[in-house]
Amino acid sequence: MNIKNETVFFLHSEETAFLLVDVQKSLMNAVQDNNRIETNMKLLLRLANVIGIPVTVTTQNASRLGPTIDSLTNLLHKDQKIYDKLVFSCLRVKSVLEEIQSKKTIVLFGVEAHICIFQTSIQALSAGYNVIVVNDAVSSRVIENKESGLQRLREAGVILYSTEMVIYELLGEAGTDNFRAMLPYLKDSSKA
C-alpha cells in the first residue's frame, strides 16, 4: 500500500480543526445510516466544545438543500459562521481555507463521503495537512459510493478514524474535567 502521509502522529487539540461538511436535512434524509452518523457527529461537536477545538461548517447550495440540521446547529457556538458553497471541495472556499490555515490536522465528518468529503480531503492532503476522515460519521446515499470513497481516501494516504478513536485520542486520559464532561455521552450516546 502506498501511503503518502508517512508521519505517525497523535491528535493534539491545539493543532487540530474539525470540518463539518454539508449536514443538511435533504442530504441527511437521503444518506445511509443517517441516525448513527448524526449521533456520532453530535459526539464530535460536544468534544469540540469541551476541549476547544475550532469547528468550520459548510453547506452545499443551502438555498436548495436547506441549512445545517438543527440537532447540530444547537451544538455550535451562537456566532458560528456557516460557509455556503457550490464547489465540492470545501477548501476551494477562501474563508474555509483561512479558518484552518494555522492547523496541522483536519478532521472531517459529514456528507457525502465520495463527493465533498473525498474532494476536500484530497485537496487538504495535497496542501500538506494531516487529514483524518471519521468513517462512522460520514455517509453517502448509496453504500457502495461511501465504500469506494473511503477506499480511495485510504489509498491516497488519508487516515480513517472512528468517532471513539478521535474522542479518546484527544481526551488523552481519564479522570480529567474534560473526560468527566464527555463521560455521560460516551456511556450513552443517545444523550449526545
Image (spheres, grey):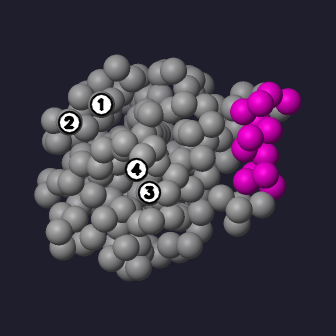
Which residue position is annotated with label 2?
Answer: 95
Magenta span covers which residues? 175-187
Q: Which mark is residue 73?
A: 3
Which residue position is annotated with label 1?
Answer: 99
Quote the CA–CA distance across marks 2 and 4: 14 Å
Rendered location of residue 92, percent (x, y): 16, 42
Quote the CA–CA distance across marks 1 and 3: 18 Å
Q: Is residue 171 above or below residue 75?
A: above
Q: CB of mark 2 within 8 Å of CB of mark 4?
A: no
In the structure shown, which secondary structural element does the residue marked by tag 1 occupy? helix
Residue pushed farthest front? 78
Residue pushed farthest right? 175
Residue 126 left/right relative to 102: left
Which residue position is annotated with label 4?
Answer: 20
In the structure shown, which secondary structural element does the residue marked by tag 4 occupy? strand
Please tell me which of labels 2 and 3 falls first in the chain. Answer: 3
At label 4, counting other C-alpha atoms closer than 10 Å, the crowd grade (few under 14, some 14-19, many 20 or more) is many
In the structure shown, which secondary structural element does the residue marked by tag 2 occupy? helix
User: Is residue 128 among what the camera can see?
Assistant: no
**Kind of residue at badge 4:** Leu
Residue 11 left/right relative to 116: right
Please tell me which of labels 4 and 1 falls first in the chain. Answer: 4
